[in-house]
Image: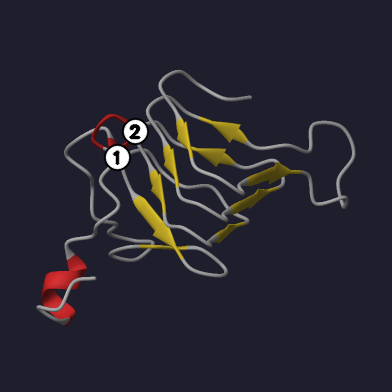
Amino acid sequence: VIGNNVSILHGVTLGGTGEDCGDRHPKIGDGVLIGAGTCVLGNVRIGDGAKIGGGSVVLKEVPPRTTAVGNPARLIGGKENPIRLGKIPSFTMDHTSHILSQWSDYVI
């Protein structure tokens, strides 16, 4: 199930894990941005306005207006206190993260 105003870039997989019976596929909320090459697997929910980094493998729920990256995907800011996004990422198509400025001033 895919919500409204979702941006899904090339090479994204939305699928079941093959381990569950019944409803096995992801639910994508409104205004979500899913980066290229991402896999979202299983009966998980991607909350409204969330952003998934390219190449990530999402196996657990992503709360609304948060960013998840990596394999397996983890929330930017941590599970207990994830950093909340101020804008709808599917509208802005902003693939950057504020943490880059903390790590380095070099941006590709």
Circle 1 packing at 10 Å, graded few (<14), some (14-19), many (20+), is some
Look at 44% across and 36% down and name the residue there.
Answer: 47
Circle 2 packing at 10 Å, graded few (<14), some (14-19), many (20+), is many
> From what the image shows, is residue 101 above or below residue 51?
below
Residue 63, how many percent across, how many down? 41, 43
> From what the image shows, is residue 64 above or below residue 75?
above
Front one among 98 and 7: 7
The quarter of the rendered structure image containing the C terminus is: bottom left
The quarter of the rendered structure image containing the N terminus is: top right
Q: What residue type is labelled 2?
A: Ser
Q: Which colour scheme is used?
A: secondary structure
Give the tally of numbered discs: 2
Residue 49, how many percent across, how many down? 34, 34
Front one among 5 and 36: 36
Q: What element carries label 2?
A: helix
Residue 3, how many percent across, how many down? 50, 21
The residue where tag 2 is placed is: 90
Q: Which mark is residue 55?
A: none
Look at 79% across and 31% down and name the residue there.
Answer: 23
Residue 53, how many percent across, how many down? 42, 57
Look at 57% across and 68% down and name the residue there.
Answer: 72
Left-right relation of 77 to 72: left
Q: What element carries label 1?
A: loop
> From what the image shows, is residue 59 above or below residue 107?
above
Q: Do the residues labelled 1 and 2 touch (CB within 8 Å)?
A: yes
Q: Which mark is residue 93?
A: 1
Alpha carbon of mark 1 to alpha carbon of mark 2: how far?
5 Å
Q: Which amino acid does label 1 sit on?
A: Met
